Image: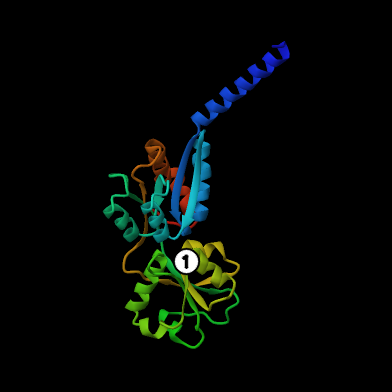
């Protein structure tokens, strides 16, 4: 074996050991979070990785219902953050959460928005029964918490029958936001934090009263790969830095 060959082998071994050590030190976390948390959690993830060298956070954003279904089917998720208590309650009943890790971390509010180009603005939910609002977007109530909040508010206002034929249902609150921003519907129900993202294309008509607060719970998923890292992420979200980021995106404290 020539000295050049030995040097090459030694160099390859050193690189392999270095890469192996790096991989061994890497800590990976998968977080499934409600679509309305997309922007805020991406910023939180970056801040968490900076504060914890070697950690890497991968996010999966969608409506809370489909996220729960994925966890139920065995998706490799370490942390779950829902946009409502009902979805998290179902996860708890199905023993999908690690005991004692569930906690609330933020609040939001439901609003009715219209395209920025709209010539009229509803002053009350009852105005949606008028001729100017033929297409009203909301999340699918069965899987999108914002859709459930909206459906409950409409029923409480006695508008269920009047609006039944006008609904355009989206798969997430962000899809509803896009419908309104593109002017494809006359109005839509989203969270206040979502409306703030498209300030140039939509405007808030009114805040919609909800029977229960729009609160967000977070929990470690049972059977995750790294309990300590998952707990650290949850603590970061609920801590001063995480709360500061959430407030910057329009969320309020729990």
Of the 4 image quadrants, the one containing the C terminus is bottom left
Q: Nearer the viewer, residue 16 or 181?
A: 16
Q: Position of residue 100 (x, y in %)?
A: 28, 44
Residue placed at 54% from the left, 82% from the top?
120
Specify the color scheme: rainbow
Q: Is residue 120 left or right of residue 228?
A: right
According to the image, label 1 marks what residue?
171
Q: Is residue 239 visible?
A: no
Seen from this angle, which residue lies furthest bottom? 131
Q: Nearer the viewer, residue 210 or 184?
A: 184
Residue placed at 52% from the left, 54% from the top?
39
Q: Position of residue 165 (x, y in %)?
A: 44, 83
Q: Position of residue 224 (x, y in %)?
A: 38, 42
Query: How many numbered circles does the render carry?
Result: 1
Residue placed at 32% from the left, 77% from the top?
156
Please, is residue 198 above or below residue 89 in the view?
Answer: below
Residue 203: quarter of image: bottom right
Q: Is residue 70 visible?
A: yes
Q: Secondary structure at mark 1?
A: loop
Q: Residues within 10 Å of mark 1 (few under 14, many from 20)?
A: many
Q: Position of residue 38 (x, y in %)?
A: 50, 55
Of the 4 image quadrants, the one containing the N terminus is top right
Q: Nearer the viewer, residue 243 or 3?
A: 3
């Amino acid at each position: 074996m020539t000295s050049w060959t030995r040097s090459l082998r030694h160099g390859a071994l050193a690189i392999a050991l270095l890469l192996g050590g790096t991989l061994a030190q890497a800590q990976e976390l998968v977080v499934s979070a409600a679509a309305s948390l997309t922007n805020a959690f991406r910023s939180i993830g970056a801040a968490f990785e900076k504060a914890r060298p070697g950690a890497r956070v991968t996010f999966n954003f969608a409506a809370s219902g489909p996220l729960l279904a994925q966890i139920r089917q065995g998706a490799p998720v370490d942390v779950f953050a829902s946009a409502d208590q009902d979805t998290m309650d179902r996860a708890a009943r199905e023993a999908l959460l690690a005991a004692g890790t569930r906690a609330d971390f933020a609040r939001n509010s439901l609003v009715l928005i219209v395209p920025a180009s709209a010539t009229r603005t509803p002053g009350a939910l009852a105005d949606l029964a008028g001729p100017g609002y033929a297409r009203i977007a909301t999340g699918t109530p069965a899987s999108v918490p914002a859709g459930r909040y909206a459906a409950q508010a409409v029923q409480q206002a006695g508008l269920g029958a009047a609006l039944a034929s006008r609904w355009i249902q989206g798969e997430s609150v962000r899809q509803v936001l896009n419908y309104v921003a593109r002017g494809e519907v006359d109005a839509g129900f989203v969270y206040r934090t979502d409306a703030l993202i498209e300030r140039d294309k939509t405007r808030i008509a009114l805040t919609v009263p909800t029977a229960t607060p729009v609160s967000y719970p977070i929990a470690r998923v049972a059977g995750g790969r790294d309990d300590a890292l998952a707990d650290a992420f949850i603590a970061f979200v609920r801590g001063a830095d995480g709360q500061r980021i959430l407030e910057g995106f329009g969320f309020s404290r729990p």
